[in-house]
């Protein structure tokens, strides 16, 4: 199949639907240069085609260029305001970049047009989850589930929302149902593992995570969760071996580095943790990595290191930006700059008012 796809892409089909169809297959196989050449040619021939712009947006975001991705996506949404799929994808990207009010406005607009839209209600639930509002998320996910009971994603989302509010029994009931419908569903297996882990049932947690890793070997999250459960069981040999396997499959990735640092901190091997983290300090770091590096720096009491980590942090979602303010507040407090600490705590709470511990810190 690969030579056929490559041959088709090299012909540069001018029909936008043909070009985008081939490009999406190329993107799935990480042939990004071929996909880009195909889409740019299609865009040149049809500059106002929203589907081509949407594909260019997805390609840019796959490469990590969220600015270009949002630009293409915004143009596509403006050109085709009746395409609810594009409107919802724009809402998701705006939310991921911290523009939560705009995201909510778009989602509400779609629901006003089509209140039976499964994807819109699910997107609303995901939005509430990202802003730290689990009760509202549960309501939206439940509506989505009722609109289309055949789709498992909303069922798993609802289970995760129950997990976030501490209702492990209801989460377990929903996940049993989801796995009965689709035994190897990735999201359901991961949620079931998380649920068992929170219930301190390490045997079942490892079983679910192991199944996720077996049936979805190219999902990094399955490997990281399996490693974390092994560490919770104090089996660090298995935990590090799992991370080594992940490095072999995925190469060096920020979430793998963050997990290594976390394990070393758990074992109080702070100097080793610092050595692992050192290579990341001079690069822009995603949330999973910088939050772990900042926790390490705080443990070491190294203010300069904390400042370096926070200066190189990337925080897009509102929860991530709230965490960034929280770490800055802790740094200011450690330096006895209480005025700055109060300002940072207030900023954190404004972004995520549901975190009770932050209220006590501010007090």
Image (cartoon, helix red, strand yellow):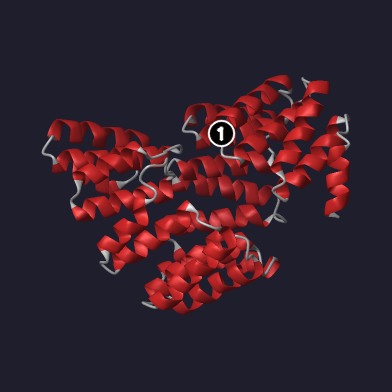
Q: Which residue was labeled with disc 1?
A: 66
Residue 196 point in image, percent of width and height: 47, 70
Within-10-Å neighbours for mark 1: few <14, some 14–19, many 20+ = some
Q: Residue furthest left?
A: 336
In which quadrant is the N terminus drawn? Answer: bottom right
Relative to 48, does residue 282 appear above or below in the rendering? below
Picture residue at 70% right of the left edge, 66% below the top = 181
Picture residue at 41% right of the left edge, 60% below the top = 259
Judging depth in this view, the residue of 261 and 130 nearest the camera is 261
7 lies left or right of 334: right
Residue 256 point in image, percent of width and height: 46, 58
129 lies left or right of 175: left
Judging depth in this view, the residue of 211 and 25 nearest the camera is 25
Picture residue at 58% right of the left edge, 66% below the top = 189
Relative to 285, does residue 94 appear above or below in the rendering? above
Picture residue at 66% right of the left edge, 57% below the top = 152
Judging depth in this view, the residue of 51 and 138 nearest the camera is 51
Q: How many numbered discs, if any?
A: 1
Q: Is residue 169 visible?
A: no
Q: Quadrant of residue 346?
A: top left
280 lies left or right of 153: left
Relative to 237, does residue 88 appear above or below in the rendering? above
Q: Quadrant of residue 117?
A: top right
Relative to 225, does residue 241 appear above or below in the rendering? below
Residue 45 point in image, percent of width and height: 83, 22
Secondary structure beneath label 1? helix
Residue 238 point in image, percent of width and height: 45, 76
In which quadrant is the C terminus drawn? Answer: top left
Q: Is residue 348 visible?
A: yes
């Amino acid at each position: 199949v690969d030579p056929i796809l490559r041959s088709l892409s090299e012909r540069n089909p001018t029909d936008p639907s043909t070009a985008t169809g081939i490009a999406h297959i190329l993107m799935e196989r990480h042939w990004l240069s071929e996909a880009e050449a195909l889409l740019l040619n299609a865009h040149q021939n049809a500059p106002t085609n929203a589907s081509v712009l949407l594909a260019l947006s997805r390609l840019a975001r796959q490469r990590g260029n969220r600015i270009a991705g949002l630009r293409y996506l915004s143009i596509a949404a403006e050109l085709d305001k009746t395409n609810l799929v594009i409107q919802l994808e724009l809402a998701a990207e705006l939310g991921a970049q911290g523009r939560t009010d705009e995201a909510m406005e778009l989602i509400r607009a779609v629901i006003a047009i089509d209140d039976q839209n499964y994807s819109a209600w699910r997107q609303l639930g995901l939005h509430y989850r990202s802003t730290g509002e689990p009760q509202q998320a549960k309501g939206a996910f439940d509506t989505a589930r009722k609109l289309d009971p055949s789709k498992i994603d909303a069922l798993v989302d609802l289970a995760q929302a129950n997990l976030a509010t501490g209702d492990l029994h209801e989460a377990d009931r929903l996940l049993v149902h989801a796995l009965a419908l689709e035994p190897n569903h990735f999201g359901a297996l991961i949620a079931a593992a998380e649920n068992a882990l929170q219930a301190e049932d390490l045997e079942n947690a490892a079983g679910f995570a192991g199944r996720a890793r077996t049936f979805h070997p190219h999902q990094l999250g399955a490997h990281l969760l399996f490693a974390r459960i092994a560490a919770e069981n104090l089996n660090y040999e298995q935990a590090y071996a799992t991370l080594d396997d992940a490095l072999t499959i995925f190469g060096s990735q920020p979430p793998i580095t963050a997990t290594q640092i976390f394990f070393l901190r758990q074992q109080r091997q702070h100097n080793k943790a610092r050595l692992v983290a050192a290579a990341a300090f001079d690069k822009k770091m995603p949330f999973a990595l910088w939050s772990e590096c900042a926790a390490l720096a705080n443990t070491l009491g190294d203010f300069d290191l904390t400042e370096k980590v926070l200066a190189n942090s990337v925080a897009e979602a509102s929860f991530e930006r709230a965490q960034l303010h929280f770490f800055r507040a802790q740094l200011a407090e450690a330096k006895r700059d209480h005025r700055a600490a109060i300002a940072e705590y207030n900023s954190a709470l404004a972004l995520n008012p549901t975190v009770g511990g932050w209220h006590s810190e501010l007090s």
